[in-house]
Amino acid sequence: NQALHFQSVRCIECHTQISDSILVAHLVLPKEEAVQNCSECHSSDSRLMATLYKFQSIEARNQYGFFNAVVMNEAYVIGANRNYFLNLVSLVIFGLVCVGLVVHIVARIVNKV
């Protein structure tokens, strides 16, 4: 249905080229060069993910701080998702545990003698 289609997408999604360097396409193509094949947008490798949802996915990556948010794709993959703040907290805790072990060992040696 054409009316439903136009409620969901902008005209520039079909009438512009995909560009990785800018968020919003500026070069509007003539109708002869517009997307004619439905599968270009309605497939797992949709061109809409590179245009319409580009800003949304970049903002989500920035908001949640995930290094490899491209892998996420709105899903959680065990062991594949890394968060900068969680990495930092885990390193601080690990460092504190190591310092605690060293202090404990030194205290045991000093008290033994």
Image (cartoon, rainbow, N blue to C red):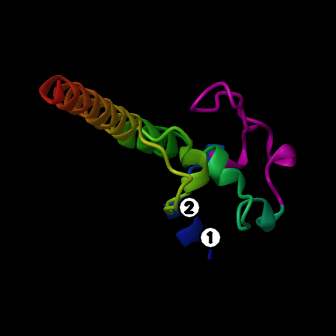
Q: Residue at x 71, y 58 (%)?
A: 46
Residue 61, horizontal then vertical, whole percent = 46, 41
Q: Residue at x 54, y 61 (%)?
A: 77
Return the residue nearer the eye: 22 or 61: 61
Return the residue nearer the eye: 8 or 87: 87
Task: Give the residues in magenta.
Answer: 13-36
Q: Is residue 13 left or right of residue 112?
A: right
Looking at the rendered structure, the secondary structure element under dot 1 is: helix
Q: Is residue 49 left or right of residue 85?
A: right
Position of the N terminus, as image quadrant, is bottom right
Classify 94 as above or below 50. Answer: above
Residue of label 1: 2
Return the residue nearer the eye: 25 or 50: 50
Main secondary structure found in the magenta portion? loop
Residue 74, horizontal then vertical, whole percent = 50, 60
Q: Residues within 10 Å of mark 2 (few under 14, many from 20)?
A: few
Q: Does the magenta portion include 104?
A: no
Spot the residue most to the front: 113
Residue of label 2: 6
Residue 59, horizontal then vertical, whole percent = 43, 39
Instruction: Please state which amino acid type lies under the numbered disc 2.
Output: Phe
CA separation in Å, label 1 and label 2: 6 Å
Q: Specify the label residue 32 is tagged with.
A: none
Q: Is residue 9 left or right of residue 113?
A: right
